[in-house]
Amino acid sequence: MLATFIIDAYKKSESKEIATILSKSCDATTCCEWSSAGVYSFWDYYTHEVLYIGLAVDLADRFKQHNGIIPARDNSCKKLYIDEYFSHKEKLGYTIFVQSSLSQPITRKNRGEITDEDISYDLVNMRAAEDREDIKVVEGTMIEAYRRRHGRKPKWNKRRGSRYGTNNVRTNSYELIECITKMEPHPLVSKSTFRELETNPTFERYEQLLHALRVNMLYMGMDLHTALNVVLKNGNPMLEEQYKELAHSGYMRKHLIL
């Protein structure tokens, strides 16, 4: 399930660096940190205006298309918008809303790894369908929540997204929009950028632990303490030690700096 927002901002000259990090951390073919599929957003680094909300089965490839690193039709990506933005502004905000690699859907990249002899094949297909639908619903919910608050969609969005997502908007749905550019500490927002997580395995491990709590907080309406108790209810000593390490590390007080 989608539960963690990871934020960064980049210069035009840094787009390949971001693409490389996404390819490593959101790889459909390996057991990496995050699923390749998720929701993402481009936003104005200087005004914090959300410019676009989209979804992707492969976040890395989609980012590459939007930034002209791999080819795509102009009408199927935001390259022209991004080029225009960089013509007068130095840095562009970029946020991904991710799910665990345990929720990795089937894509063209990993399809060949699953064979008919695999006894979990049907279950994997079922899970993939559910995970893809979850992403569509979240994207549609976020676009509609933005539209209701501002009277229009984000300026780079042409479509409204999933109909079910549109109908799924609740009073607190706009909180997801606020998380896109949230610099202050927030339960759903990673305390480290893409680049920090790439270079610091400890921070990456902490964010993986926090993701499990965020799932319960976001989808079950739990507070942090209750979510932690649920995660630890099976009495796994190793997991308990990891959360103790996290609690005493000071990481929860860390602030994002872009």
Image: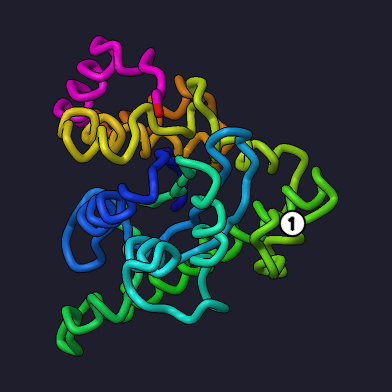
* x, y percent for residue 145: 73, 49
- Is disc 1 surrounded by few (<14), some (14 to 19) or many (20+) residues within 10 Å? many
Q: Is residue 187 magenta?
A: no
Q: Position of residue 215 (x, y in %)?
A: 45, 41
Q: Which quarter of the image is occupied by the C terminus?
A: top left
Q: Which residue is mark 1?
A: 153
The image quadrant that residue 190 belongs to is top left
The furthest residue to the right: 151
Residue 72 lies left or right of residue 44; in this view the side is left
**Which residue is found at the position 68% from the left and 56% from the top?**
143
Q: Main secondary structure of the magenta part?
A: helix
Q: Could you say which quadrant of the image residue 237 lies in?
A: top left
The boundaries of the magenta stretch are 236-257
Q: Pick the residue in front: 234 or 208.
A: 208
Residue sitting at x 26%, y 38%? 195
Q: Position of residue 225 (x, y in %)?
A: 45, 20
Using residue 186 as the reference point, say whether residue 99 is left or right of it.
left
Q: Residue at x 77, y 40 (%)?
A: 171
Q: Farthest residue to the front: give it.
A: 87
What is the secondary structure assignment of the residue under circle 1? loop
Residue 243 among magenta residues: yes
The residue type indicated by label 1 comes to: Lys
Q: Position of residue 175 (x, y in %)?
A: 65, 36
Can the viewer see residue 101 in this picture?
Answer: no
Q: Is residue 127 left or right of residue 179?
A: left
Q: Residue drawn at (60%, 41%), measured in percent from left and top? A: 176
Residue 170 position (above or below residue 156): above
Left or right: 23 in relation to 128: left
